[in-house]
Image: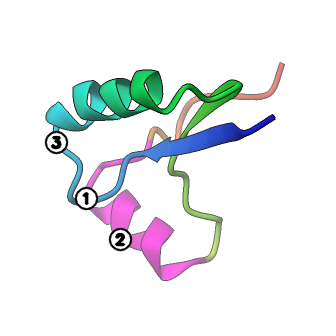
Amino acid sequence: GVVGLFVFGFDGDTPAIFESTYDFMRKSELDGISTAVLTPYVGTPQRDRWIEENRLMTNVPWSL
């Protein structure tokens, strides 16, 4: 089957992206759906910029 992966968190995303993506998912009749939040890798310029802009939660202990 066909599985769609949808990534959220790009600079141009607005709250409206969630509803339009949901509508697309339903109309596409995909066999599976997966979503993810855009997360820049450590050491990349994108991550450095996001840290400067307070867009990352760097003080959260994500590991269990």
Residue density around tag 2, few if under 14, some if 14–19, many if 20 or more, within 10 Å? few
Q: Which residue is mark 1?
A: 53
Q: Residue at position x 33%, y 48% from top?
A: 55
Distance from label 1 to label 3 (Cα)?
A: 17 Å
Q: Which residues are magenta?
A: 44-56
- Graded by Cα atoms within 10 Å as few (under 14), some (14 to 19) or many (20 or more), the crowding at tag 1 reads few
Is residue 50 depicted above or below 14 in this figure? below
Which residue position holds label 3?
14
Residue linked to disc 2: 49
Q: CA distance from mark 2 to mark 3?
A: 19 Å
Say if the magenta span includes residue 36. Answer: no
- Describe residue 43's horizontal placement relative to residue 1 as left or right: left
Q: Nearer the viewer, residue 22 or 62?
A: 22
- Disc ID at residue 10: none
Question: Considering only order in the chain, which callout, 3 or 2, is on the residue closer to the N terminus?
Answer: 3
Element type at mark 2 = helix
**SS of the residue under disc 3:** loop
List x then y, in percent, for residue 49: 35, 71
Instruction: Please state, as top left, top right, bottom left or bottom right, where the N terminus lies in the image.
Output: top right
Residue nearest the observer in this picture, 52 or 47: 47
Q: Position of residue 9 (x, y in %)?
A: 37, 47
Evaluate if marks 2 and 1 touch, with contact meaning CB atoms under 8 Å apart. yes
Q: Residue at x 63, y 76 (%)?
A: 43
- Quick one: SS at disc 1? loop
**Main secondary structure type of the part rendered in magenta:** helix
Q: Nearer the viewer, mark 2 or mark 3?
A: 3
* Pointer 3 local density, CA inside 10 Å: few below 14, some 14–19, many at least 20: few
Residue type marked 2 = Arg
- Looking at the picture, tell me which residue is in the foreground, 30 or 47: 30
Is label 1 in contact with label 3 (beta carbons under 8 Å)?
no
